[in-house]
Each structure stands twice: as C-alpha cells, then as structure tokens.
Image (cartoon, rainbow, N blue to C red):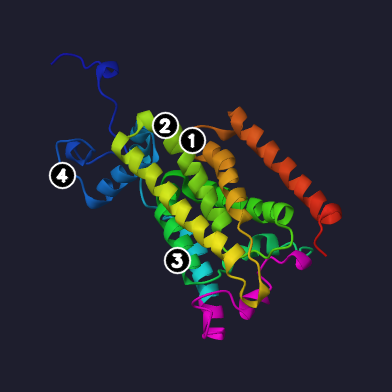
Amino acid sequence: MGDIDLEQQEPFPVDRDGKPFRSGADQLDGDRKVGCCEKFQLSVSKWMLPEDARSKYLERANCCPPPIFIVLISIAELAVFIYYAVWKPQKQWVTLDEGIWNSPLTYQPESREQAWRFFSYMFVHAGVEHIVGNLVMQLVLGIPLELVHKGFEVGMVYLAGVLAGSLCSSIFDPLSALVGASGGVYALIGGYFMNAVVNFREMIPLLGVFRILAIVVFVGVDFGFAFYRRFVNDEAGLKVSFVAHFGGILAGMTIGYVFFSAYNKKLLKDPRFWLCIVGYIVFVLVAVIFNIWLTPAS
C-alpha cells in the first residue's frame, strides 16, 4: 500500500461547531434531499445576501439562537396596544384616544425632558392599521435579517431608527406628539432597501425587482396613513407627527446599510462604519442642543 499524502487529501468536512458530518449525504449539495430548515435558510440567503456571501452563511446557518430581539419587541408593542385598547375599548381599536395621549410612553413636546420618551413612543400605536402595518413589516423583514445578522446588529439599527425618528420629529415638527414604531421599522427598511439596490446585480433579478416594488408599495401606503393622521384626522385636537418615518429611513440607509452590508466582515475596520457613527453622534448632539435651547415647544 502506497504512502498517503495528507496534503493532497480534501479537508475533513466539519460543521460550524467543529463536528464532522456523518457522511457526504449530510452536506448541502445537490445529491440529497434538503430538509425544511435548510430550504428556509437557503431562501433567506437568496433574499438577504449577495451571491458571494451565501455560501459562508449556509455553512454557519442555524436557528440557534432564534431571532429573539424582533420577536420580543413585537410582543411588547402588541401587549401595550392591547392594554390601552382594553382600557379604552370604545375607540382605541380605531384611532388615537385619550388613554394613549396621557400615556407616560408617548412622546410629547412639553414632556421632552423625560428622555425615555424619545425611545418609549415606539411601544404606543394610534390604531389597528398602525400597529398591524408595523408588526407585519418588522416581522417579515426583521426575522430574516436577524437570522443573517443576529440580534445585536438588528437591534442597534432598529433602536438607532427609533431615536433618529423622535429627534427628527422634535426638530422638524416640534409641536406634534409622536407614537408608533415606524422609526425602527423604517430603519430596517432603509438598510435592506439600500442593500437590495446596491447588490441588485448580484441577487436574483426577479426577486430584486419584487423586493424593491414591495418596499415602495408599503412605504407609499404607510406614508398615506401617516399623512392622514397628521393633517386630516384632527380628533381631540391631537396632531401626530410623521417625521419619524424620514428619520428612521435615513438611519437605515446609513447605519443600517453599513451593518447589513458587512456580513462576515469586521465593522471596526470599515471606514463607512466610523463615518456613519460619527455622523449619527453629531446629529444626536445637534438635536439635543436644539431641544434644550432652540425649540419653539414650551
């Protein structure tokens, strides 16, 4: 028997935890039937990643840990909505009511010194169509994003959008209240949209067109409801700002794009990351200064 040249052998097939595959049939190839979980991960990779990053994702992909952040934040938002709906059952299922207006979670210009309101407004929604739209979009988009990029990245982008939304509203619509998770949702949309556009040629063209059209349609419908709540529905004399949508989508198209385009890369070595972080910090400082000394709100 001749000597075996170890250097010419194929590397031992191992999974992400260093465990060897039981046989060649256990590997992701075209010679075996792919399981449901693997089919789902393959679909996620096609929707979320350019072609050159899919193989690395599929090597590492599993559902542990599951997408905890986006699920928990959605449950919390739904729980708060149900709480106020039960408390004020006559109108709350349709439109904004006194219960939400007096909530310690709602962002109100006259209460902006209570800094938690710049974040907590995301838990309060103005009605059924408001919360359903936000929950559906953030679950449909957020779960696949979190499977690929994990909870920390998605959470950072989401919360950056929430804060950017309230700060933009406090500057450009300083006399209006603010409710809803649209800032966070639009941050996810902005980041994903930029990736879909920039990597369009590297993704499946038909899916790329569908993704972009779906986002445009959703944004158009949601902006329509937002404009209605702001300029048409003046029930109880309350004006709910829509500027958070712009703040959220800008945060997503900058910070979100950097996070979501840096799969399997070191963010700290990416100059785009530092550019976006510095720009975001400058924006926050300018907004804080405005809210302390320059705002027309009482």
Q: Where residue 132 is drawn, which disc sits there?
A: 3
Q: Which secondary structure lies at badge 2?
A: loop
What is the number of callouts on the image?
Answer: 4
- Residue 276: quadrant of the picture: top right
x 56%, y 79%: residue: 84
Residue pictured at 42% horizontal, 44% vertical: 148
CA separation, marks 1 and 4? Answer: 31 Å
Residue 27 position in % (x across, y down): 23, 38
The image's mark for residue 33 is 4
Q: Earlier in the sequence, mark 4 or mark 2?
A: 4
Residue indicated by mark 2? 199
**Which is nearer the eye, 286 or 91?**
91
Q: Badges 2 and 1: C-beta atoms under 8 Å apart?
A: yes
Residue occupied by mark 1 = 261
Amino acid identity at mark 3: Val
Residue type marked 2: Asn
Looking at the rendered structure, the kind of residue marked 1 is: Ser
In the drawing, does residue 256 fall left or right of residue 52? right
Q: Is residue 19 visible?
A: no
